[in-house]
Amino acid sequence: MLRVALTGGIGAGKSTVAAKLSELGARVVDADALSREVVAPDTEGLAAVVSRFGAGVLDDQGALDRAELAAIVFSNPSARAELEAIVHPRVRARARELTDAMPDDAIVVQDIPLLAETGQAPGFHLNIDVEAPRELRLERLAARGLPRADAERRIDAQASDAERREVCDVVLHNDGDLHDLEHRVKMLWDERITPFAENLRLGRYEPRPDKLQLVHTDPEWAHRFEHLAARIRRVMGPSAVRIDHVGSTAVPDFLAKDVIDIQVTVVALPLVDAFQDALGEAGFFGKVGLDTPKPEYPSAAQWEKRFYGYADPGNIAHIHFRPIESPGQRFALLFRDWLRADPQARADYAHAKGALAAKFDAAPDYTEAKESWFSTEAWPRANAWAAETGWHAPVC
């Protein structure tokens, strides 16, 4: 199933987005609702809260007095952390129960206000952040009857917009009217979420467009790499010796196809095959691949790799799993570092790209033609640069 995390600061409009996604067909799991459920009367969670904070946090009926508890924790970071240590694991466990009971082809949206704070983002295929200006959020909270001082404390107790953006793939701005927000949600559903779910169902990654298009550096490329790397680390743990952003999108201020190239260094390729199912569940699908052999290493066996892609149509990526200290693993890092360090190398590669782009309209033809430049120009020059500068491939 496609697992989507939905987050946003208090008053940003996350519940509105969740409602629209539910209307479109998503199965919504509301963390706020679950946080109430796990501390309902006669639950083990409520007993743990009372044990820590005392019977004064209960109302006359023996239920949790949330306002009384909020008054304690929102002015005391240590107390808030203790409350979260009680509530969050129980909420996550209950969310897993609900999700596991859903159909395999469901699109599950978990509404998680504290996604950035709790480190859960890599466990989801797609993370969405809902944002609104601070003053507008305060106005919305005031309309709900929350005093401004309390609203400000709650906003300040949560992650900042910048911190949420760091872990999210999509940002929805909710500073206009309801119709505009719902329209953007519908577009996201049609253009990204449902195709993503279909790719997962069919066990395929999103291919790059057939038509060649080179674009200038996008500041989001680095974020896209970090999000994908975090998902791979979550699956493979220390079996991924290194995860590096390579290729043209890893070179600042450079022309590239809008495809993130990632190299995952492993001890041996059969290790990747052992993770095939787990990688598939995380949205990564692939096959046996082969880099083009270079003169000093003519054996094709030395250039074998595993080539994977990601199922998200909004984050097209190529993941190259290569053995540690293999010629392909070393060259991917060397080529990136050479381009970053040598202006003439960047200029020459950009010229070669431009010439080939003018000649070939299809991305596969362009890529195949570019291999000649890699073998005759990039390989000898990058290796000469490495010898001159003392560059060597980092091990871990």
Image: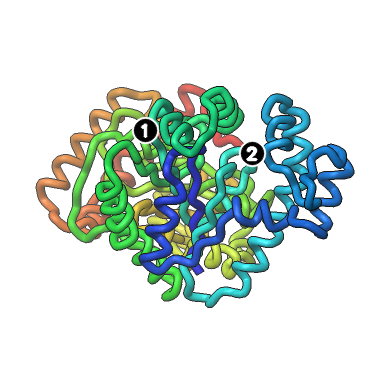
For this orientation, the residue located farthest to the front is 60
Q: Is residue 394 above or below residue 372?
A: above
Image location of residue 319, percent across then percent down: 46, 54
Image location of residue 335, percent across then percent down: 41, 37
The amino acid marked with disc number 2 is: Cys
Q: Residue at x 73, y 43 (%)?
A: 65
Q: Is residue 68 above or below residue 59?
A: above
Question: Which one is nearer the viewer's eye here, 82 or 273?
Answer: 82
Secondary structure found at label 2: loop
Label drawn at residue 203:
none
Q: Residue at x 73, y 34 (%)?
A: 80
Q: Residues within 10 Å of mark 1 (few under 14, many from 20)?
A: many
Quadrant position of residue 150: top right
Quarter of the figure with the C terminus: top right
Q: Is residue 36 left or right of residue 145?
A: right
Quadrant position of residue 91: bottom right
Label drawn at residue 396:
2
Q: Which residue is mark 1?
A: 251
Q: Give yes or no for contact between labels 1 and 2 (Cβ–Cβ under 8 Å).
A: no
Image location of residue 340, percent across then percent down: 39, 28
Q: How many marks?
A: 2
Question: Which one is nearer the viewer's eye here, 310 or 238?
Answer: 310
Q: Is residue 252 above or below residue 321?
A: above
For marks 1 and 2 on the same chain, the one whose residue lies earlier in the sequence: 1
Q: Is residue 350 left or right of residue 272?
A: left
Alpha carbon distance from label 1 to label 2? 21 Å
Image location of residue 107, percent across then percent down: 46, 67
Q: Is residue 347 left or right of residue 46?
A: left
Q: Residues within 10 Å of mark 2 (few under 14, many from 20)?
A: few
Any part of residue 305 in sight: no
Secondary structure found at label 1: loop
